[in-house]
Structures are given as structure tokens and as C-alpha cells.
Image: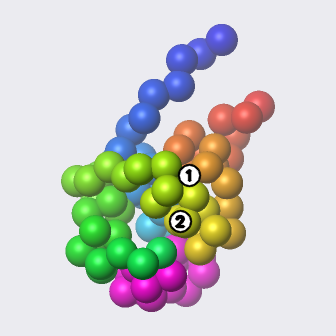
Amino acid sequence: MSQLTYDRKAVGQRIRRKRKELHLTQAELADKINRVTKFCADIERGQAGMGIDTLLLLCKALETTPTALLWGDDAAA
């Protein structure tokens, strides 16, 4: 079994990709999760981590799962 690690930069890239797929700006995403735009930008760049509550809000706003954001869509396989 491979060990899963939390890579903030990779998570941020997945968040950015999903946000763009949904045609959302960082400001719109920030509004949906009740955070400031800079925080969303920092997460996308891997400059900031996030708590479970923010992760769950992002999942809802981006119509995805925690597994998909944290480790990619193929991590469950």
C-alpha cells in the first residue's frame, strides 16, 4: 500500500483546475466558502494550508470530494 501525503501545491493545482472547469473566479469561490480572495489564492499557490471545515466547503463549492482534492481522482483505486 502506498503512503498518501498532503502536498499543498498539488492540492492547490487541483482546486484551481476544478474552479476553472466551473468557470468561477477566485473571488466567486471565496464568496461561496465565506473566505477572503487572498486566502483562496494562497491555497491555490500552495502557500497556505486549510482546515477540514474549509476543505469541506471547497468540496461543496467545487462539486467534488475530499479525496479528489487531496490526492487526485485516481487515489481511491
Q: Is residue 52 visible?
A: yes
Q: Residues within 10 Å of mark 1 (few under 14, many from 20)?
A: many
Rendered position, 32 above or below 39 = below
Q: Quadrant of the N terminus?
A: top right
Taking the spot 28% from the left edge, 68% from the top edge, the residue there is 39
Left or right: where does residue 20 sit relative to residue 67? left
Q: CA distance from mark 1 to mark 2?
A: 9 Å
The disc label shown at residue 58, or none: 2
Taking the spot 50% from the left edge, 82% from the top edge, the residue there is 32
Left or right: where does residue 67 sit relative to residue 41? right
Can residue 47 be found in the magenta stretch?
A: no
The amino acid on which the numbered mark 2 sits, given as a three-letter code, is: Leu
* Secondary structure state at the residue bearing disc 1: helix
Q: Quadrant of the C terminus?
A: top right
The amino acid on which the numbered mark 1 sits, given as a three-letter code, is: Leu
Q: Residue furthest top?
A: 1
Rendered position, 74 above or below 22 = above
Front residue of 23 and 32: 32
* Secondary structure state at the residue bearing disc 2: helix
Rendered position, 57 above or below 8 = below
Q: Magenta residues, as a range?
A: 18-32
The disc label shown at residue 69, or none: 1
| Magenta: main secondary structure | helix
Taking the spot 34% from the left edge, 70% from the top edge, the residue there is 40
| Residue 43: x %, y % from top left | 33, 59
Contact check, label 1 and label 2, Cβ < 8 Å: yes
| Residue 17: x %, y % from top left | 51, 66
Q: Earlier in the sequence, mark 1 or mark 2?
A: 2
| Residue 58: x %, y % from top left | 53, 65
